[in-house]
Image (cartoon, coloured by chain):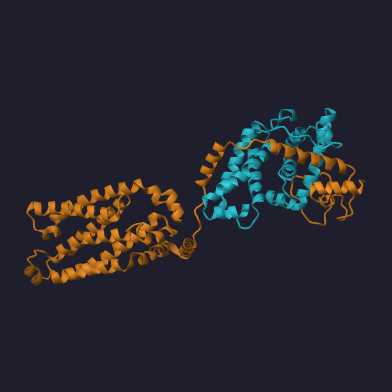
Chain colours: A cyan, B orange
């Protein structure tokens, strides 16, 4: 059964649709929030809050609109709200790269010019240090495997803007990682 | 300028041609939304004529590294604790919205179209007429209509009854109210329950709507009968007579309704009626007064005190279930889970 069918069932008041949706989205949402926050417990809380909002707003769902971008739209809004919150501003706003490596160990990266010089977790950890508008599109595109139209729908942006942010975000990430690797001591700029 | 294989690799990993990416221009805040027009290019060139950048191969490699790292991380990520998932599912299940009901939605739309509170109230009350069904209307009218000729002085004397018209009305009023309310809220064993559950109103609105019809119809019947009594018995004081049957209607209706929240309507109705008759007996026969004395202020005044006590008790019983009464009804599933 598709996500869309499950959401329609949920809208019609069938509680049996809850469990499949939780099983499909709980783990990816935790991973999404972790990749942005590098805080396991925060990721857990935000993922649960996201699922709560998904279920409680099921009445607003319009079948057969794709569910996945909608879920990530809720998630992205939650993350933005959290970033605006006092807890974020006074707490974990700026974890340095080397302190933000709690995530499960990643496998070996592809044998390539840049990637071979990186530990996989460094590439992911570097995402958190990017400007937020770059980090969110890169995580959605390369970690959560959303397509450009899906990201555009989730972030309520034109597709051209999403493409631009992905491209410039990648360049920004490469720039930061290169400086990390070469240890030139310069603050990374995008 | 990059070569073609680099360009293909970058396009494959990005999911789009970088030439399609917008160039917001130097100094532009990339965080701000920019127009998604296909006329824009990131190098200020027409779409398709923009060369792949020199660092295209490195960017493709970085994107692939990110994807691979994310895949590896996903594989290593622990599954959520099953107990925690169960708790989460249980908590979320309680949030599942009540199913949408076309009948309720239409009723609500009809209601919202009415101008002013009076029209809206009437629109909410009107559907209850059909729900009360024919037995209620016929039986109530038959009880009053059959009683009046029986109590004409000649017939009453031949039957050995010491009743006046007024006393009859005071005795029949609580019976009408009890039977009416018990019938109107006759419960889930009838098909009415399903209709009630698809109603767009809250139970409180539904209760008021139905009580309105029971009280209004009984008042109409007994009001007519009172006028007739006043015409047949000039000694009857119309004001005391109306007060005499209006009180039991009000008190019995509210009492039966409040008891019906806890016990079946027929049980609650019988109990309330029995209590009423007991009080009436105590106030008349136990004081060596004829039953006809119920129209006398000597009986009516203490009766009013009992009525006030009964109303307070009924209000307390209703208040205990107020959250249920103010929860919107929306379907059988909702009833099953939340009631």
Residue B329 % position (x, y): 43, 55
Q: Is residue B144 above or below residue A50?
A: below
Q: Is residue A154 left or right of residue A160?
A: left
Based on the displayed image, in which of its 4 quarters is residue A115 positioned?
top right
Q: Position of residue A187 (x, y in %)?
A: 80, 31
Q: Between residues B145 and A67, which one lies in front from this camera angle?
A: A67
Residue shown at 44% from the left, 55% from the top: B332
Q: Quadrant of residue A135?
A: top right
Q: Please name the residue shown 70% across and 38% down the image.
A: B75
Asked if residue B330 lies left or right of residue A138, the reply is left
**Residue B153, x across and y down, in percent:** 9, 70
- B54 displayed left or right of B199: right
Along the line of sight, the residue nearer the viewer: A161 or A41: A41
**Which is nearer the eye, B136 or B36?**
B136
Question: Up-down: is B130 above or below B54?
Answer: below
Left or right: residue B238 versus residue A167 is left
Answer whether residue B327 is visible to the viewer in this image.
Answer: no
**Residue A149 in view here:** yes
Quadrant in the picture for residue A43:
top right
In the image, residue A173 lies at what x, y percent? Answer: 80, 38
Instruction: Identify the residue at horizontal 62%, vertical 42% (top origin).
Output: A26
């Amino acid at each position: 059964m598709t996500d869309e069918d499950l959401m329609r069932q949920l809208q019609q008041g069938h509680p049996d649709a809850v469990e499949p949706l939780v099983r499909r989205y709980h783990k990816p949402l935790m991973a999404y929030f972790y990749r942005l926050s590098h805080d396991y417990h925060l990721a857990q809380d935000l993922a649960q809050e996201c699922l709560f909002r998904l279920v409680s707003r099921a009445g607003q769902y319009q079948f057969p609109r794709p569910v996945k971008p909608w879920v990530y739209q809720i998630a992205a809004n939650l993350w933005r709200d959290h970033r605006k919150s006092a807890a974020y501003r006074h707490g974990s706003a700026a974890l340095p790269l080397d302190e933000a490596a709690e995530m499960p160990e990643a496998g070996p990266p592809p044998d390539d010019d840049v990637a071979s010089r990186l530990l996989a977790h460094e590439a992911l950890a570097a995402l958190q240090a990017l400007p937020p508008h770059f980090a969110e599109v890169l995580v959605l595109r390369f970690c959560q495997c959303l397509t450009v139209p899906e990201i555009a729908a989730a972030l309520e942006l034109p597709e051209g803007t999403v493409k631009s942010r992905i491209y410039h975000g990648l360049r920004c990430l490469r720039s930061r990682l290169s400086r990390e690797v070469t240890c030139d001591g310069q603050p990374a700029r995008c | 300028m990059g070569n073609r294989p680099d360009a293909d690799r970058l396009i494959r990993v990005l999911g789009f041609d970088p030439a399609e990416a917008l160039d917001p221009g130097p100094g532009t805040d990339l965080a701000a939304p920019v127009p998604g027009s296909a006329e824009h290019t990131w190098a200020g060139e027409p779409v398709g004529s923009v060369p792949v950048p020199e660092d295209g191969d490195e960017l493709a490699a970085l994107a692939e590294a990110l994807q691979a790292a994310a895949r590896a991380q996903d594989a290593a990520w622990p599954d959520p604790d099953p107990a925690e998932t169960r708790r989460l599912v249980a908590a979320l299940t309680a949030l599942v919205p009540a199913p949408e009901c076309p009948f309720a939605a239409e009723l609500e739309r009809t209601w919202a179209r009415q101008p002013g509170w009076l029209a809206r109230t009437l629109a909410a009350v009107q559907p209850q007429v059909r729900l009360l069904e024919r037995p209620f209307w016929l039986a109530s009218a038959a009880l009053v209509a059959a009683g009046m000729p029986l109590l004409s002085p000649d017939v009453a004397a031949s039957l050995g009854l010491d009743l006046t018209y007024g006393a009859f009305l005071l005795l029949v009023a609580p019976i009408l109210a009890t039977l009416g309310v018990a019938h109107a809220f006759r419960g889930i064993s009838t098909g009415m329950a399903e209709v009630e559950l698809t109603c767009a109103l809250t139970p409180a609105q539904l209760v008021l709507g139905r009580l309105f019809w029971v009280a209004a119809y009984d008042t109409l019947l007994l009001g007519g009968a009172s006028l007739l009594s006043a015409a047949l018995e000039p000694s009857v004081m119309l004001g005391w007579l109306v007060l005499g049957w209006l009180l039991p209607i009000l008190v019995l209706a509210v009492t039966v309704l409040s008891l019906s929240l806890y016990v079946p309507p027929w049980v609650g109705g019988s109990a309330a009626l029995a209590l009423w008759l007991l009080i009436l007996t105590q106030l008349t026969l136990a004081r060596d007064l004829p039953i006809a004395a119920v129209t006398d202020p000597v009986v009516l005044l203490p009766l009013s005190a009992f009525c006030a006590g009964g109303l307070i008790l009924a209000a307390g019983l209703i208040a205990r279930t107020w959250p249920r009464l103010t929860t919107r009804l929306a379907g059988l599933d909702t009833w099953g889970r939340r009631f």
